[in-house]
Image (cartoon, helix red, strand yellow):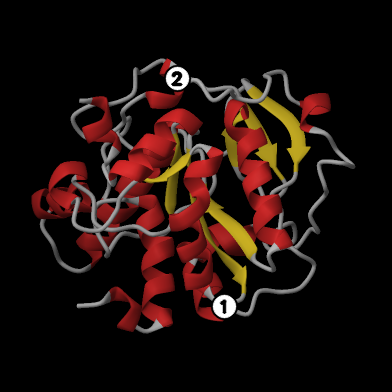
Amino acid sequence: MNIKNVPLFFLTIAAVLLSGCESSPTAGSETSPKPEATLQTSLQDLSTSDSKPNLSEQNDATSHQTSENSDTASISATSLNESSASDTLTASAPSDNDSGWALILVNRDSPLPQDYAPKLTELRNFQYVDERIYPDLQKMFDDMREQGMEPLIISSYRSREEQQEIIDEKIDFYLGFGYTSEDAQAQAYREAAPVGCSEHESGLAVDINAEEGDLWTIYDWLARNAWEYGFILRYPEDKEDITGITYEPWHYRYVGRKAAKEIYERGITLEEYLE
């Protein structure tokens, strides 16, 4: 079935839900975590415009994540000319050279080290990213806005505790539908990555939707251009047998510009590139 024929309501619901648990279109919602002491509390750009979003179904589906952040989600963006990343970040902008930190593989077979703790930059809408990807992420968002789009990050860094909360919420959800404890846990882990196995825990992944305008305009632009900024479509179509994750047009992962260019041009996944 051509995914573009699916009604926008269901796609946006799936986009938000899947951002929490990458492996299933029936995944539940999540909230943004409050990171640990490594957080660099420099309120950065990547915020949204002053106008309210017109994707009401999308915002309804974001559950308590979006509703709790609604006051800050509409803060207008600040240009890098007004608030330079070099003034607020302790790390310099990433180079075109691949770095080990940007190419770390995170999936069910390759969990993050238990002591993994990225240094984070706080964005204006209570989202957090590894400080090293911020310059390229900001540049990408600036260029999108210049072309009339209104991108919105709906999920980014997630702590181990946050990931466990998502799993626990799913277990409770299925228990409420009469599942046995064993079956509820099995279903939850089919939908949610185990702790340490979600890319969101790395601080290198972001889920991007549209605050305003056509959702697929955002997705199409990202699919064609994100590689230029060091980001890849992490879970493309027809690659589920390799990634273990269904197609997610909203989920982008930073790998560095050199790797992103090759992955894009070859039409491969991060797993294939690292082989």
Q: Single out the residue that lies furthest toward the front.
A: 265
**Residue 62 or 121: which is nearer the viewer?**
121
Q: Is label 2 in contact with label 1 (beta carbons under 8 Å)? A: no
Mark 2: few/some/many CA within 10 Å (<14, 14-19, 20+): some
- Residue 55 shows which numbered tag? 1
Give the side of residue 97 with respect to residue 232, left or right. Answer: right
Disc 2 target residue: 101
Q: Is residue 256 visible?
A: no
Quadrant location of the N terminus in the rendered image: bottom left
Name the spot of residue 199 as percent of width and height, x first.
Answer: 38, 37
Quadrant location of the C terminus in the rendered image: top left
Q: In front: mark 2 or mark 1?
A: 2
Tell me the residue at 34%/53% (across/down).
169
- Name the kind of residue labelled 2 in the image: Trp
Q: What kind of element bears circle 1?
A: loop
Tell me the residue at 61%/45% (across/down).
127
Nearest to N terminus: mark 2 or mark 1: 1
Q: Single out the residue that lies furthest toward the right.
A: 82
Mark 1: few/some/many CA within 10 Å (<14, 14-19, 20+): some
- Name the kind of residue labelled 1 in the image: Leu
Q: Dividing the picture into quarters, in which one does residue 108 lie?
A: top left
Tell me the residue at 28%/58% (across/down).
247
Name the spot of residue 152 as percent of width and height, x first.
Answer: 60, 59
Q: What kind of element bears circle 2?
A: helix
Give the side of residue 66 with respect to residue 204, left or right. Answer: right
